[in-house]
Amino acid sequence: MNHMVDAPPRELDLGVHWRHGFASLGPAFYTELPALPLPDPYLVGLNEPLAQALGLDPALLAGDEGVRALTGSLAIAGTRPLASVYSGHQFGVWAGQLGDGRALLLGDLDSADGAQELQLKGSGRTPYSRMGDGRAVLRSSIREFLCSEAMQGLGIPTTRALSVTGADAPVRRETVETAAVVMRVSPSFVRFGHFEHFASRGQDEELRRLADYVIARHFPECRTSGRFGGNAYAALLETVSERTAALLARWQAVGFCHGVMNTDNMSILGLTIDYGPFQFLDAFDPNHVCNHSDETGRYAYNRQPNVAYWNLFALGQALLPLIGDEETALAALESYKAVFPRELESCLRAKLGLADAQEGDRTLIEGILQLLAKGSVDYTIFWRRLSQHVAGGPLEPVRDLFPDREAFDAWLLDYAPRLPADRRAAGLAMLRTNPKYVLRNHLAELAIARAKQKDFGGVAELLAVLQSPFDEHPAHEALAGFPPDWASRIEISCSS
Ligand code: AMP
Ligand code: MG
């Protein structure tokens, strides 16, 4: 009798071809190491459309072996897990070496949107973990999973999330929580901090190699545009400044607070990255600080645009050895100051349904933002109701949001004549600009509470709705309502 049993598979073949662009930079940029397995992982959420876009079989991923692979508990054939090294400024202070303390890059896959890197987050300690345990908790992993896809649904540049898986292994934060892993997806996970790392050590050769890699892979036009007399590194800084400006305009317009805009959390592609203590504004408050650990309010909502410039300045300083002179670097950074206000105004004009730019638009925009702040009016609900009104709905639902109705009426007297002749078309366009659904803190909290009881229905429901946040989804109306009173007492900190 044959007593041999099939050995469990040592790796899973996902049937796709992996490339290793980042690994080609060489060992100065990373340490290769496997993920540390978590016992008995379970699927919390799977992003099927993204799986399909990557050529991955959702059914395979959702199976036992797939879930173990998504958790880092079973190796994936063809991958080459590595933790990259970076440094950065945290809360305005140079923090020295950081790096992927709990993330592993697996390699990249071809997709319709070009090469996409896959990265495990929460897959165990790495040489860059410092005091950390290399893990992520279920709570923050669900937040990252959902918010990545919420941003994507809103059309805001972001890293994506393929899956979130959990395990009952305890992870100590303020209380004991459980472990989870997010499989993140992005054309690149390179941060400003990667450049700062090599610049701070005077490793000019590695600095150049990294810049050349980013340019070749993502911004080849920097080599050929002839900008800055053919200085490709200045063109790179300018491109990143423009992209970051466009991103910040989108954040401000939708009411998104990132919460930890450290330079190591800034994407070189201008994507939203590292979802931690983020928040979509409930009541409009320009001074809102969403990160409970941010005692000075450095990353308050209305400070984000300036912080982004500060971070770009740090990137410019890091690129200085390549750019050559300070004047050129400063000139490249100037684009931020030009692009951000232009983009923000254009976003807000679209939110108001104004087809063309006219004098007085800024007054109109500032006027409504002041009224929203003064009345602590719910930001998302205001824009949605205004859109519905312009599309032909009644005025009262918008007007009733304002404690000072007369002040709103006065603003309306200036606004209404500015609307295009075809108000219905303008209103319909506004409904595609002003989302009905955003991932408010309390919505995430409710889905997390259910997930802790192993009911992942709330995560699936939010994922489906947030992937098309401009649609009505009448069956999910409750997700579009005012936040409950307890929402203002939710405290989200850096602890994740
Ligand atoms: P963050 O504030 O989440 O952007 O993290 C800042 C740095 O700390 C990065 O280098 C992270 O990889 C690292 N880090 C955060 N949490 C952990 C953890 N639990 N274990 C190891 N490293 C961590
Ligand atoms: Mg980070």
Image (cartoon, rainbow, N blue to C red):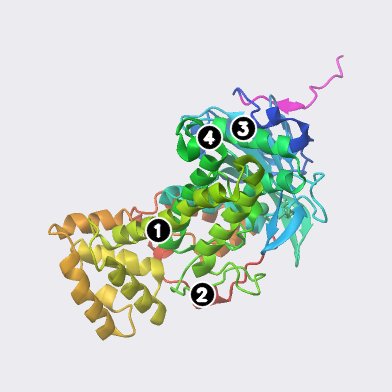
Q: Is residue 463 visible?
A: no
Camera-nearest residue between 310 and 441: 310
Residue 315, x across and y down, in percent: 61, 50
Q: Is residue 38 above or below residue 66?
A: below
Q: Which quadrant does the N terminus fall into?
A: top right
Pick whichever of labels 4 and 1 is earlier in the sequence.
4
Q: Quadrant of residue 445?
A: bottom right
Residue at 73% x, 56% y is: 178
Q: Are marks 3 and 1 in contact (CB under 8 Å)?
A: no
Residue at 79% x, 55% y is: 132
Q: Secondary structure at mark 2?
A: loop
Pick whichever of labels 3 and 1 is earlier in the sequence.
3
Is 494 positioned to the left or the right of 384 in the image?
A: right
Extent of the magenta region: 1-14
The mark found on residue 270 in the picture is: none
Q: Is residue 53 visible?
A: yes
The mark found on residue 218 in the picture is: 4
Residue at 69% x, 48% y is: 196
Disc 1 target residue? 476
Residue at 77% x, 27% y is: 10
Pick whichever of labels 4 and 3 is earlier in the sequence.
3
Pick whichever of labels 3 and 2 is earlier in the sequence.
3
Q: Secondary structure at mark 4?
A: helix
